[in-house]
Amino acid sequence: MTPDPADPKTVPPPQPADTTSATPRRVKEAGDEMAANATQPRKAADTNNLRREAEAVFASGGAYFGSSATVDSVVGRDQIVTNIHVGGTGTATRTTVVYRLDAEQVRLVRDAFVLDQQYAELLGRTRGRNVILLQAARGSGRCATGLRVLLDHHRTEVFGLPPDATPAGLGSAVEQDRGYLIDNLADHRIRELTALALHDLDARLGSLRATLFITVPSGVAFTDPGVQRFVVTLGKPATHRAIVESHLRHRLGTARADRLLREHDLGSVLDDVVTTDSARERAAEFALHVEDLVVRGRLDLDLLRARMKTSVAAEVETWFDGLATPSLKYLAIAAALLDGLPYQTVIEPAGSLERRLSPAPSSVAPAAVPADPFATGRAHRVREIRAQIVRATVPSRLGPVPAEVVRYLDPAYPRAVLDLVWREYDAVRGELLGWLGDLANHPVDAVRVRAAAAIGLISTTAFDYISKTVLRPWAGDDKENKREMAAFALRAAGRSPQLRQQALALVDEWVTGRSWQRHATAARVYGSALGATLPKRAFHELDRLSVTEDADVAFAIGYSLAELIDADHRHALPATSMAVRWMGSGHQGQSATGQIAFLTLAADLVGISDGGQGAWPLLLRLASRDFALKHSLSEAWHVTLNGAMFHQYAQSIAGAWAELVEPGDEARQAWALVLATAAAGHERTYKIVRWMAGNWMTGTGPVRAPRTGQAVLAALGPTREFR
């Protein structure tokens, strides 16, 4: 049978690892890495967030959505800096910015918004609500819709807040008769939403006749199902044609716009340059170009079509060619790759690119005059590349930190700059790929993910070349960073209808080969890279790869499962059940892989907020509402706490859960019930759990969680006699 990459059943099973390369670590040697990983949880969530941010930055002609950097200050905005109290009874405050929305934007939404039946129904569903979560796809015009709803709710002033704002903590910042808009609420803030906190905020807003409108992506899963009561869905957004007509009537007047629409074949041009899945902003841009051409004296449809297709590309090419020095071009390329990241994180890769592309000094040439380090300042260089420095709060492993980030003024520039450099400058292609390869080993996670995303972007126009020169070497690298970046880089091709089969064939080549490095890379492909797009295939392939003796492959499987669950909570049950099945395998390596995978999930998927009552491990929160998942979770703890290889690490992670749930009554009881279920009918497990709970109560050892320990002992019941 000929292997078909679209049908995993026709692909041969993976071959034993080739040990002629770097010696792989066996699964029995995984303990130290497991302990180290447990000290740095949320890798899966961070990876998913960084991947989404990279895709947003490089979106074709799109806007910058989903940034994890919180804007604190941008020159020229009318800002109101507010200290907001957060947390239960503590004294912690955080500074946020409430800013007046641009007056022209408000006028455009007031005068040109399409008021169709869909909007009328949406407006009716929002009447009487003070907190509204609008769930809609990106590019559907949800921000404009939110602004229009606030205006139609007769809010005298409308203010915006950054995506990282904490909705539950905004009560102290709200003023009477105002509307507030948070567009594209950050992922971690979505996970923190609770029905209780939103009810309290709703009451506060109601007393002030104020409204908060929040937009969130379609398909997002809320940790607390009660949040769904605050959600309204957009339904079918206005068509691009309707938006063009409405904007033209606003810009040119009804009579003139209608005459243009009758006399010119604008519809065919619109269909040619704006696809059905284009963002609604493209329709508004189309109307703007029509107005400009009409005002200039003649509506040339060919010129209109060319403007829409090449406006950004042509503008970027002219500007880039006109940059005064090569150093500015290197900075422009680095800023395009790393748009939205801290300035220092951008400037160092710009310097490394310059060193790669600058000619080596000649031994016979006269000594060069040393460059003046004070010749041009940062502000001038950033202005020259049409960017800005923004004071922001950015995430880090140690928590949010203040930073000054670099952003292009036009969010279409990052993709356009990278497209231009790869397409037009043949002489730099090799060094550009080498530079991206260096950045795939960068110590900053966001830089590595951006480098992989750029390789993926390039691969969509040169897949055969990139797969041979970049992806295959990275996939076979001994370094985990390079292997992970190879997996992430495949996402772009894997999501392309023209390249999906080729991308899957490449992964199957890695799966069926004998290299443990490529087995590990293939496992990572089926996490954040392609797993969410092809979940059925992902579970099948991870199952195949689980028959391994290699620790790197086992950890790759575990983190891919964690990314799948973080992206879609519905994957928690099949992932946990599959890990439990592996634990019971007669193959020692697969059994160990099951334990490694589960303990990776348990250690990494933590920190789900419970409205001021502490935090939950994600699996525990989901299991508290799903009997089947609770059963699988209990079985997984039973096996790992008794396992010969990893029981000490299982006990350590169980202790971390105990500390995490200590502040919350519901979380403590849920954890106690899971452990009591794990111990039911098993003498050894019963004694282990009882011993752990006793230590948590007394603080014997590194964990002190007396209320959790007491809850576990109560759930276990009196000391039992086992026969």
Image (tube, rainbow, N blue to C red):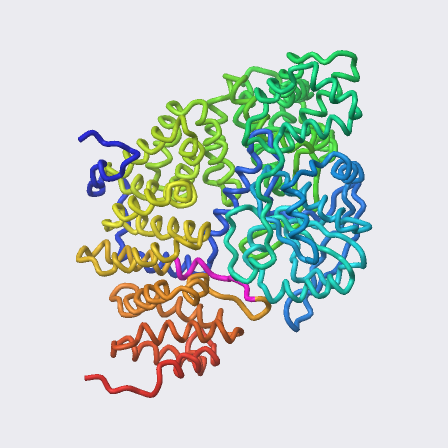
Tell me if residue 368 can be seen.
Answer: no
Bounds of the magenta segment? 601-610
Q: Residue 206 at what x, y percent from top left?
A: 74, 62
Who's the residue at 34% across and 88% down the image?
A: 718
Tell me if residue 236 can be seen.
Answer: yes
Q: Please state if 19 lies on the left or on the right of 221 as rendered.
A: left
Q: Please state if 286 lies on the left or on the right of 528 as rendered.
A: right
Q: Residue 243 at what x, y percent from top left?
A: 67, 31
Rendered image quadrant of residue 324: top right
| Nearer-the-camera pick, 173 or 176 | 176
Rendered image quadrant of residue 115: top right
Who's the residue at 70% across and 29% down the image?
A: 386
| Nearer-the-camera pick, 293 or 260 | 260
Q: Residue 437 at what x, y percent from top left?
A: 45, 33
| Nearer-the-camera pick, 614 or 627 | 627
Q: Please state if 278 lies on the left or on the right of 649 as rendered.
A: right
Residue 602 drawn in magenta = yes
For the N terminus, give its image quadrant: top left
Residue 262 drawn in magenta = no
For the C terminus, give its image quadrant: bottom left
Rendered image quadrant of residue 586: bottom left
Who's the residue at 80% across and 25% down the image?
A: 253
